[in-house]
Image (cartoon, grey):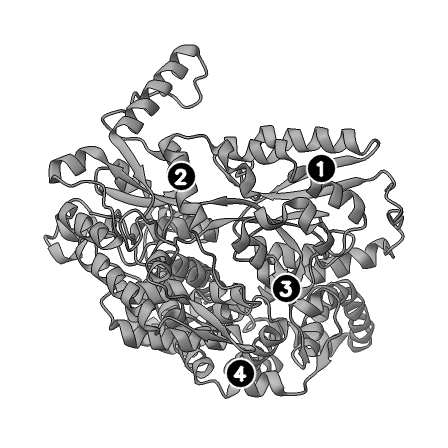
Amino acid sequence: MAATAPALQQDDAAVVFPRRRRRKLGVYGLLVPAAILMGVALGYPLVRQFVISFQEYGLRQQFGQPAEWVGLQNYTELLTDPYVWTVIGRSIAFCLVNAAVTMLVGVAFAVLMTRIGKASRITLQVALLLAWGTPVLASMTVWQWLFDSQYGVINYVLAHVFGLDDMAGHSWIIQPLSFYFVATVIVVWMSVPFVAFSVYAGLLQVPEETMEAAQLDGASSRQRFWNITIPMVRPVLSIVLLLQVIWDFKVFTQIYVLQRAGAPTRETNLLGTLIYSYASEFSMAGALATIMLVITLALTGFYIRQMLKEDEL
Amino acid sequence: MKILRFAAVGVAAALTLTACGTGDDAGDTPSASNGTPEPATIKLWLNGTDTPDALREYLVTTFETENPGSKLVIEEQDWSGLVPRLQTALGSADQTPDVVEIGNTQSPTFTYAGAFADITDMYDELGGEKLLQGFVDAGSADGKFYAAPYYSGARAVFYNKDAFAAAGVEVPTTLADFTEVAKKLQSDTQSGFWFPGQDWYNGAAWIYTNGGDLAVKDGDAWKGALSSPESIKGLEEVQDLFANATNAPADSDSNEPWVPFNAGQSAMFSAPTWARWSIDLPACNKAVDPDDTSDAAKALRGEQQACNEEHTGVFPLPGLDEGSFANGFAGGSNIAVAAKSKHPELAKSLVRIIFTEEFQNMLGENGLIPGNTAYSASMGDDVYAAAAVAAALNAKLTPAAEKWADVEGDRILEDFFQKLATGADVKEAAAETDQLLEDALN
């Protein structure tokens, strides 16, 4: 996407420079409604969260008692709790593994879509769209039933079709590692369609002529893929990866539903569910949410800088 | 929650901006305090379908006759997600319901936070000493009375009479006997007692009956009490049941325990007595369409229910000695007037109606143990009522700690019982959990 855009802009700028300025003002004008909406819907809560995180703000304050300023107390309390660090570590690991697996599977599907016939491609696309379009809670109910220890299809198949008798009544979510395995399967299943479609769109932009020229020069299909296709769709890949990292870091619904299906809560908490569990201590939740925001920025800052640089070229 | 709450705040802010100051002008006509409140519409929040329709209609008509010109609107709230909903609604004078029903274990959190109006002066009028005392404790804070007992639902043990006959066992008469009977009933295909790993609601009975507790107040601080010798004794019995008397998965909770019972996979389960309506043994099933309202269908359903009840027995969980009953965990609700209600006098008048003899008896007739024990005779005298009343009178609540809701939010006890179910060392797990309870409660 971005690979072709700069060329056009350069031409433009060279010919009609003065007009570009005026257009820029217009562009800022167009940004106003979106900026207001963001300010109200995102900015206000963010500021409020930030303010609250330096106060003692719980239910009593919600019902009218004055909120006391406590400085950094909420932060020090959280950051000196080894459990919070465990959860942060888990969240980062979960996010990296999930983002990586999602990208691999997603890119594989995208490449597959460019190589197969129309009928099978459309079937695949419809299947992916359905996975993407199913409401999270609805599909979580289905997944929960699939992995149910008593009545789940997976245990039934393993025990009765493959003869693994131990698997009858096996609980998939009671051990943290096994819990995260199930969660990963679900999260990846839900995120792959987005990656696959975005990357597929990117792949379609790779000019046919370049590929033909490379082929004539004797590049093997593997070489063409790694040395031409991948660099050309790199902007798409990096933005999709960035989004995946952000989404997988703040994953909540899937973990929450699986926990409620009977997993040990404390041993499976990620940051999202830990913040949720501070239901009546808004100041603690605010502080942890702020910490989470900082970690997200740290995880993605490098990428964002890289992307901005590429855009400037 | 944080995130949801902030989203809500954001939306609210957006609405306020667009509406340009809907502020405090609406409905700012406080009730006169001389006993004749101005007519207004008040809102009552009831949770789930626990309060039957007939009772709701009674409340509406009685309230409107007693307060001419005023109206009562009853809104039904879902039990799940109730706490966050109350946190936001009760905090705003414009949105708050005037009278709210609240689960007994959730009650202390809100009473301490100042969400409810002080009704100490109504204590004697509503029933005084006759009110369910455990619920009164849950509804009181710092010596003041905020939330009155609405109803209680006690747990009793349901058993399959055919399975008992086949195993040659009788209804157990002591708690130790109960374990023996459950073990005798246990086989690979049938659980002696349906006891899912996260089911601390039922598990608490073993702690309470042995004289233990979940947490106790020590001076100003709460202390976890699971490591006390009494609690440990109960917990060891719990672990024995988990290991030798149930096939229930360690990763399931106390929801719908009648499902395996109906499927013949369990000989006993423990649940509030209204679970009788969910029992549906295959031998008795007449395959009637639940939407069919013809007389023939009704007759068949009656037959089916009679057949189910013939094959199913019920008893209150026995205590340590023969003839005594266990101290189970009491489910149920409190009822309170919101602190931010704009019509506190009307709200109080509604609370008075709830505590009239007539309404209390209606609760009892519908299988709910009324908040005022003077009227528990209205439960009737069938086996279900007898079991329910026996269990309720001995029932105990969770500790009335301000932050008890955090313990439930963190699912500390679910995790703890699950550890017992997977064979963890009782003393170690109890000590660890005590620490978590202390962290959460103080």
Q: Amino acid at mark 4?
A: Leu
Residue A172, image x, y percentages: 27, 60
Q: Quadrant of residue B373?
A: top right
The label shown at residue B141 is 3
Identify whether A155 is placed above or below B271: below
Q: Amino acid at mark 3?
A: Ala
The residue to which callout 2 is attached is B273
Residue drawn at x 33%, y 67% as measured from the top left: B231
Residue drawn at x 55%, y 40% as measured from the top left: B374
Q: Amino acid at mark 1?
A: Val
On screen, residue A264 versus residue B330, left or right, reads left
Q: Nearer the viewer, residue B415 or B8?
A: B415
| Foreground tag (3 vs 4) | 3
Q: Nearer the viewer, residue B137 or B199?
A: B137
Mark 3 vs 1: CB contact within 8 A: no
* Label 3 or label 2, whichever comes before in sequence order: 3
On screen, residue A72 versus residue B18, left or right, reads left
- The chain under label 3 reads B
The label shown at residue B73 is 1
Q: Amino acid at mark 2?
A: Thr
Mark 3 vs 4: CB contact within 8 A: no
| Foreground tag (1 vs 4) | 1
Mark 1 vs 2: CB contact within 8 A: no
